[in-house]
Structure formats: structure tokens, C-alpha cells
Amino acid sequence: MLVSSASLCAFRALFGVLMVVSVMRFAGHGWIAEYYLEPQYFFPYPGLEWIQPWPGIGMYLHYAVMGLAALGIALGYRTWLSAAVFFTTFTWAHLIDRTNYLNHYHLVSVLALLLVVLPLHRERVPAWMLWVVRAQVGLVYVFGGVAKLQSDWLLRAEPLSTWLLRNQDFPVIGAYFSERWVGFAMSWAGAAFDLSVVPFLLYRRTRPFAYATLVVFHLVTARLFHIGMFPWIMIAASLVFFSPEWPKNARAWLFGGEKVAPLPAPFALRAPAATWIALQCALALRGLFYSGDTLWTEEGFRFAWRVMVMEKNGAAELVVRDPDDGREWHVLPSQYLTPMQARMVSTQPDMIVSFAHIVDESMRARGVRDPEVRADVMVSLNGRPAQRLIDPTVDLSRDPPRILELLR
Amino acid sequence: MIRWPGWVLVTLGAAYLASNACEPVPLGDGPRLQGVKATASDIMVPGLEALEADAHALVAAIETGGREEAQATWRAARVAYKRIEPLGIGPVVDDRIGPRLDSPVDPARVLALAETATLTAEGLDELGANRLGFHALEVLLFGDPALWSSPRTHRLASGLAAVLAADITRLRGLWTDGYAVRFSRIAQPDSVYATTGAAIDALVNVLVTQTEKMFDKRLGAPLGHESGGVVDPARAESPLSDASIDDLVANIDGIEQVYGEALSALVTPALDQRVRAAFATARARLLAIRRPFAVALVDETATVESAWAAVRALWVILRTEVVGATGAVLKFDSNDGD
């Protein structure tokens, strides 16, 4: 069955505009230099070590191309090509360093990829194409909600209670943010919102109220937290839950003209869409197959839409020993890494191992034949007292880390 | 032509953008705002006034007193400076006053200044930070005793002390003549911080950074932690005056003072108790190091290592639990999160 492509085209245009803003914002904050030019070392994803920042002004040109591609998406200019260039440049940039991982960067990549494969130049598209975009947007809420079904969020109201504390100058209601019950109320409400908004968006009668709630929710989170473009992307992307003809009716509502009777877009699924959704679900759920608390071990954390569920602060130090003569060096992440990288390394076991390898190589270059590298890492998760994250006796230059159990 | 629903939307959008453009209204900020204000009014301003008085006493002691008196006043001024040093925010950074007060110096280059033809106040004022400040004076006051009897060296010491005092007076003036008010007033057009949260972030960050510097550079480096365990007393902060431990204890006092005024009310009583215990342990272990520090580094390494571990433990609790409990963002950038 074919449906109007109008809502997907509106999504494409809004997404393009937001990405133009995003690229300008990224450059304006000086993050191109901070992320790609200042670091001496990077933390690539395993198997993707070949993805490196361009030398010289290359990354500035890279972002200029990305911005032009986003503009192309917004204007619908050679949409396929614009989306392909945007997807490639954006994803490349964010795969350079694990330090910079954010759920919403992942969302931008997958939405851009969908824009590459969807034939948005056509007047009408198969219904399953609309549904795959709806599913992609819906998964963010659903898995975001599932991630909140854990004791820290529900029984300790953390980390939200702590985050609210720093927002006591929020107009009117900020005065109540230090009240314990407010943290609990907002935690439970947040989980309920994430878990229920998709069904309510899917049901025609509740859709306007669900979307209004969604807008308020994201505006409040945009004001409370440093989450960049994420709220705006979700507000724009969630419009795909409306009837495929909604842009035409919105135009008629705003400027006058004939309204179009909204046609149903019956649920449809085809093998490519099912495969895509299954892949997204598998990525999101893979954390279940690792032992230990995902928030603590971070195994299966990335690409899983575990949005805003963790306040983790760490203090890490490596101890390097030369087994030949017993000499020892103490190395802080700040000696090698940017402040942002040092902060991430101090809480994420896989990055600590990568950092240990960086230091191992550096010490070899300084003439230590076979250095042993151990890590002393203390981490506080969601307001708990700091505790050791990994076994400090393991030589990380040779062996994988042994992540210690989280003491609740 | 836009119809009325369109105008409603446009008006609502404009209202939202306007509310974002306006500075947030600081309501209900209670202890956080009080802590920020107290940091300026009860710590920084009186601390700078005390430092200024000590710096001028140092100038007078060098002019008219004996070597011992000059050394004693240098120590007093040094402690006063080290107490406020952890609050490395504002003019001390923005106006680059900090490096002029307290940078490592090359003793040979400082001594060579005494041989230059003119030792005018203007000439000394234009010197680089590596020939100015407390450590340049340390070379002259605590180095070879014969230096004190040389008129040219004595004149150099007077000149350097005058530059130090003038820099401190300028720093105090910048705080009392406006910065303290701008620091304390949140969310005003000329405020240093747009939100109380941003001010708390800044305070937490400087305390964590200072504590890291203390255990890593000022204790770890002389202990040989950067050089494969080779103890190097020359890397102590104030080796000639043997004031390195006094420097660290004054830093601990300063950090605890800021913690007590601005942050302790924001953490749970249980955490506060553990943080206070960490301060007390760090201070006690530092005071347990026997003088001279250079000898303790070699002969009583375990005692110094124990002090290093205690300051490191303080760093850990500040960097992890206090950062978390205060809702501070531990970074010096403005990156997004989610």
C-alpha cells in the first residue's frame, strides 16, 4: 500500500534544518578543534582504527561539507546525494573517537541513513517506509523507558534528583527541586512518559495530547540539561506519527486552503524494515547478555538508547612498572589526554584499557622494554560512594580488565 | 496570509525564544547561592586583604629589617597566598596575575638581574614571570646568605617585593572594585555566571584541579612518580625556603574553606563527614613529614608517600562523590551530554 510522502518530506526538511543548526553550533562552540585537533590520541572503535581526523584544516572542510549536505537535505536538493554525504561525513566524524559518543549522535546517523534509502522524491511511498521511520523514532523512547526500569531510577530517583539540584534557579518550580519527592515524581513521570508516549502517539484520539506532552517534556529537558539538539530532533522527528498528510493540513490550517481528509497508514512491514528494526533492537538489548550492571561496566551501553540514566564520576591513575628494574611511574589521564577524554577515560572500562595501551606504547618508546600497566580507578555511580571499578592487580598491557562488582 | 492559528503558534514560539533569551530568574537557590556569595565575601576578599597586608609587610621588612625578619614575612605572605591560590578564578587568571606571583624561576637568571645596570621599578615590572614573584624572592632571601649583604642584591629584592606587592594590590583591587560583586550576583547582565549551577561548577572544578596538582606535581614529582621512582628534591615547590609542606598545608586549608562555605551544605551529612575526615587526614599526614622536606623525601619516603596517598584520597572523593552530590559538571568545556 502506498501513502503520501508529505510527512516524511516534512521530517526530511526539519531534520535538515536542525542539522544545519547543529553543524553551525558545533563549529561555533569550537568543538571541531576540541574534538579533532587538540587531542594527541584518539579512542577509535575496535576495527575502525582507520577512521582518523583529516590533517590541517581538513576537519573544518569536513564540517563545511557536512553543513552543505544538511542544507541540501533541508531544501530537498538531490536528497539522496545530500543525505548520503551528510550520513558519511557525520558518521565518520563521530566514529573517530569513542570519547564523543552520544545517543543523539547515533540517532542522527541512523535517521540520516534512513533518508539515504527512502525514495522521498516520490509523491507516494510504500507504507512500510513510513513505519520504519516511526519505529526508529519510537525505539528511542521505548528503550529509553526500559533503561529506566531499574532500581537507581525508580527506587533512588537517581541520577535525576542530583541533576535537579543544580537547576534550583529554574523559574518557578526550581525552588522545589531540592525536595526528595520531586526527584521521585519526576523520575517516575519520566519513565512513564518514555514507555507510554509511543502507544499514545500511535492512537489517533490520544495523538494530539501525547504530542503536546512530548513537546512540553522536551522543552523542559532542553532547559534543564545540557543535551544539545536532542530535544529538538525528537520534537521534529515525532511528527512522523501524525497522518502522512499532516503537512498539507498544517499548511491549510496556517495559511488557509482546502484540508485533505487524513488517510490511514496501515501498519506494514517488509523484510528490509524488519531486519533494520531487529538490528536496532539487538543492539539495544545486547547489554542483557553481559554479566554485571550495564551502567557500571558499560558493556552494551553504547547504541542502546540508555538516555539520561547515569551520573558517573571517576578518578583514574595508571601505575606503570618496569619489570626489569622495578621502576614505577604514576600517570594521570590529564597528562596525555584532553579534559573531555580524561573525564571519559576515568569511568569507562574499555577506554581505560585503550589508555593503558597508549601509555604502554609511550613507555616502550621511552625505552622501557616490557612495561606492566595497572589502573587504579575509583568511580561513583549515581550518588554512591566511590568504589574501585577494575582490579588494580591486572596488567592491562597484556590482559583484559577484570571489572569489579558494583557494591550497592 | 497567516490565519489566527498561525499567529498563535508564532506568538507561542516567540514567547518561548524570548524566555530562553532572558537570563533565568534565580529563585529558591538557597544554600547554593549563599555559598557562592560567601566564597567571595568571606574567603576571597578577606584573604586578599590579608595577603596584601603581608606583602606590604614583606616590602618593609626587606627595606628595613634583617634577613630573618624578611624570611619570616616572606613565609607569612606565602601562606596567605597559598590559602587563596585554590580559588584560581577571575582576575588571577584573566589578567594573568597568577603566573607573576607564583611561577618556577631560574635562580641563575634571577641572580643575574642584580648585575644589570638599572634596577628600576618599571624595568622589574616588565620582567617575565620566570624572574618575578615569590620564588624569585625565595632565591634572594633563602639562597646564599652572602647575597643579603650585597647592596645590589638587596636592592633587587626590594624591587621584586615591591612588584609582588603591587601585583597583589592590583589583584585585591580587581576583586573589591567589582569582581566580587559580579561573582556573587548570578544571572545579571554583568554577572560572571549566568546560573548558580555554573558558579558551583567553577568552584568544584578549581578545587579538584588544585588537589590534583598537589598530589601529582607537588608531592608526586619530587617522590619520583614521574621519573621512575627517582626521588628529586629539586622538584619540590619551594625547596630553598623549605616551605613546600607549608605551601601544601595552606592549600589544604584554602580548599577546605571553600568546600565548607560553598559546598558542604549541598552534600549529605554522611558524605560531608567523610570529606572532612579526608581533609583532616591529608593535613595530618602532611604535618607528619619532618623538615627539611628534601631530607624526608630521601630518608622517610614512606611518610611522604603516605601524605601523597592522603591528598590523592582527598582528590578522589572530591572528583567523584562531591562532584556527583553537588550536581557539578566536571569539565572545562561546554560539551553536550545525554
Image (cartoon, grey):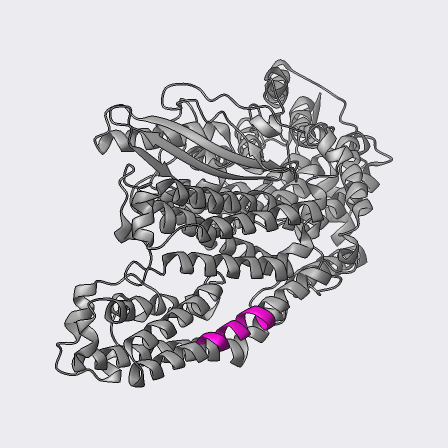
Q: Indicate the quadrant containing the C terminus of chain A: top left, top right, bottom left or bottom right.
A: top right
How many marks can you see? Answer: 0
Q: Nearer the viewer, residue B123 or A227?
A: B123
Residue B125 image-quadrant placement: bottom left
Residue situated in front as seen by the camera: B135 or A309: B135
- Relative image position of residue A165 (x, y in whole percent): 70, 51
Which quarter of the rendered picture does the N terminus of chain A lie within? Answer: top right
Q: Is residue B91 left or right of residue A140?
A: left
Start-end of magenta stretch? B40-51
Place of residue A164 in the rendered image (x, y in percent of width and height, measured from the top left): 71, 49
Find out whether residue A57 is within the magenta segment. no
Question: Which residue is rendered at x = 63% and y = 56% of the image?
Answer: B263
Can residue B150 be seen?
Answer: yes
Prevalent SS, magenta region: helix
Residue B133 relative to residue A124: left or right: left
Q: Is residue A258 visible?
A: no
Q: Quadrant of residue A323?
A: top left
Say above or below: A92 vs B240: above
Q: Residue at x 61, y 22 (%)?
A: A280
- Above/below status of A114 relative to A210: above
Q: Magenta stretch containing residue B42, yes or no?
A: yes
Q: Position of residue A180 (x, y in %)?
A: 79, 46
Question: Is A122 drawn above or below residue B138 in the view shown?
Answer: above
Q: Residue at x 64, y 28 (%)?
A: A407
In this picture, residue A373 sits left or right of residue A343:
left
Q: Residue A260 at x, y = what percent?
A: 78, 39
Residue at the top extreme of this rendering: A271
Q: Nearer the viewer, residue A385 or A39?
A: A385
Residue B141 lies left or right of residue A179; in this view the side is left
Q: Residue furthest right?
A: A205
Residue drawn 65% across the image and 46% down it: B271
